[in-house]
Structure formats: C-alpha cells, structure tokens
Image (cartoon, grey):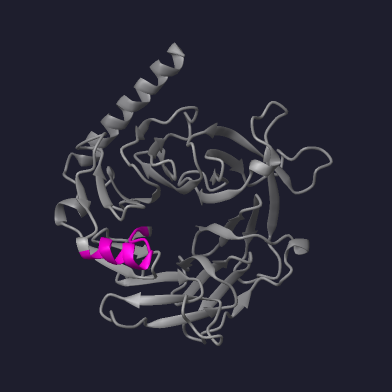
Amino acid sequence: TRAHSPSMVVASYGRRGFGSLADPEGCVNVWSAGLHPKPEFTCDAPSPILTAQFHKFTPGLIIGAGECGSIFLWDQRDKHAPVLKTPLPAYSRGGHSHAVYAMEMVGTHQSNSLISASMDGRVCVWSLNKLSEPQEHFDLKPAGPDSKHTVNDISITAMTVPHRKHSEIVVGLANGAIGQVQLDGGKEQDAGEKNVKPLRDTWSSHEGPITSIQAACHDGFDLLLSTSVDGSVRLWSPEHCQFPLLEMDCYDDYVLDAKWHPVHPACFAVADANGNLDLWDLNTDFEKQVWRMEPTESEVAKADRDRHPTAYNKLAWSPDGKRLVGGTAEGHVRMFTVAKDVYTSKPDGTARFHDRIATLHEEYKQQHRAG
C-alpha cells in the first residue's frame, strides 16, 4: 500500500492463464478502494513480476522485480512500459540472473536505495536513478569452515531490514534457515574473494522454505516474524537468535505470509494455504489467534472444482492500519476494513507488550543457560 494514499494498492502478476499471445509476460496493477472493477493503472513487463512496491519517497513511482532477475521502475505519470530497468544479461554487471522474490527500500528522502536478493544468493544495492548496474553486489556464502550450510543452500526466498540497523539485512532461505548479513564496510569479505560475504549468525529456524520474514521495532528492540511451509510462525530477537522467542505451530498447512500491524505493536496478520486469514494479538494470547476468517463453502467448492487455491499468498496493511489487503493465487486482490480495537492499541498496550516480550527474553536466557 502507498503511504501517500492509504487506499491505493499495488499488486504484481505473472502471465494470464488464458490470455492471448499479445499479453505481456507480467504486469503490475494499481488498485484503488473506490474503483473496484478495474485497476487505476497497469504497468506492463517482459517477465512475470514476483514482487512490487510503491516508491517510499516519490509518489507515482513503482518498483518491481521479475522472475528473470530484472528490476523495473515505472512512472504512473509517463507510460505503461518501464522507464528504467536492469539490462539483460545482468550477471556480468553485478546484477541478478535468477528470480528475485525479495526487495526493500532503505534511506531517507534525500538519500535512498533499493536492496534486492535473488534465489542464487546474490544481494544487490541499487540507486533507482541508475539501474544499468548496482552500486554494490555480493554473493552470500556459509560463514566459517564448520558451517552446516553449503553454497547450494544459499537460496534467498525472503528478506527484511531491521529498523535500527540499515547496515545489515536478515534473509530467509529455501532450506529453512535464517541469517544476518552485514552490508557496509566489506570487512567480512575473505581475502582473495571479491564480492563475497559470509552469511553470519545463521540459525536453523524452520523445517521448510521460508515464505516471509519481517522486522519491526518496538521500544528500542527489534523483533522478527518468520513463516514457512512447515506450517509455523516464529518470533525472533536478532540479538538472541539461536532459538525463537515464541513458536506458533498451530497450522496444518503452509503458512504463506505474516505482516506486523503498523500501529498496534502486538498485532499481526497471518495467511495460510487453507485460505484462512488470522489476526494475532500477543497481548491477549501467545498460543492462539484472536480472530479468523475462513473461506466460505462456495469458495472451497470453486477451488476444488477449478483446482485453484483460495489462499492469500501475500498480505499488506495500509499505513494507518485500518485496512488489510490480501492477494490470492487466482489473481484477486481483496481489501478488508478492520475493527477499531485492532488498529488502536489500548493506552497501556505498548507497555504491556514490552513487559510480555521482556518475559520471553528472560525465559530465552534461562533456557539458553540451562542448555
């Protein structure tokens, strides 16, 4: 969703299943809450688009990443085709040659950049004014000779940037591991290995590929949410990452996405492959969601008949937290208005959440010392 206009949503797509040969391989649609039947703007692309977002600081600009590894920039004031894109082949220039599922903007209005990560373990830092080659690029490798992971394990499926540490990223891998990477300085590069960085502080977090990971900052401490095809949601502290602070193993199918609420510190939304859409409030319960929307009988019957899942594979909150948006594998985008008690935390909500997380930290330390 767009910070400048909370009712606007951007969604990325591959090629239509029953389209014509003239259809583009991929596209990005901008939807408005007031114009349901058709998108307000459509961006065409020569590749299926795996992830897209509004430019954080410049209204009208849209960024997308493709299955081919290309990064695209569209301007709604210009035309439907990208105004800038990375060249192909891009690998020799330091760009991506594999699918890019994860990207995030960092910085300020005056100085900002885009970080992208691809399935082959390459991370790039881009200036969106120049997509001919990245400002910085490096390939990830396991840290240390005793690492349990091999180079072939470094397949990035998700990424996030801790709010207090823009100089590092946290990546989720296809083998279920999560690791931290230092961006600046380059001091961690091994001698003789140019543009290679170790994946440090790696911990085996899930028993299947990571489907999402998101950082949030609350009262001076960072928290991470991760989801996986192993049917779990886990809460982490980057400072104590050997074990999760909290394991939510109550799902019997893939968990596809989880997103922190932008206002309520203890609340987040979760989507699973059964089509359930859940809201969790950690101030209320550590073990069970406080609200669930299940697919209707007609939706389940249609999914069985058409062999299309009803699940929401991507979620996003509006910046004010009053709306939750879900995108389905069928190509539908749905916007929900949430109750006021969800997007407004109680007066003592932040303090209570801080106390509950501090308790989890203490339990973690005791468990770690005992181990």
Which image quadrant: the N terminus?
bottom left
Q: Is residue 40 above or below residue 266?
A: below
Q: Quadrant of the rendered structure where residue 358 is? A: top left
Q: Is residue 55 magenta?
A: no
Q: Position of residue 53 (x, y in %)?
A: 46, 66
Q: Is residue 303 magenta?
A: yes
Confirm whether residue 318 shows in the render.
Answer: no
Magenta stretch: dominant secondary structure: helix
Please name whichever residue, 174 or 183, is drawn nearer the observer in this view of the structure.
174
Q: Is residue 371 left or right of residue 247?
A: right
Q: Is residue 74 above or below residue 136?
A: below
Residue occupying the far front of the picture = 305
Confirm whether residue 255 shows in the render.
Answer: yes
Q: Quadrant of the rendered structure where residue 71 is? A: bottom right
Please name whichever residue, 215 or 185, is drawn nearer the observer in this view of the structure.
215
Q: Position of residue 266 (x, y in %)?
A: 27, 42
Image mark count: 0
Q: Is residue 66 left or right of residue 130?
A: left
Q: Position of residue 347 (x, y in %)?
A: 16, 43
Highlighted range, magenta: 298-312
Q: Residue at x 21, y 50 (%)?
A: 292
Q: Residue at x 56, y 39 (%)?
A: 179
Q: Quadrant of the rendered structure where residue 100 is? A: bottom right
Residue occupying the far top of the picture = 370
Q: Residue at x 84, y 41 (%)?
A: 192
Q: Position of residue 110 (x, y in %)?
A: 53, 64
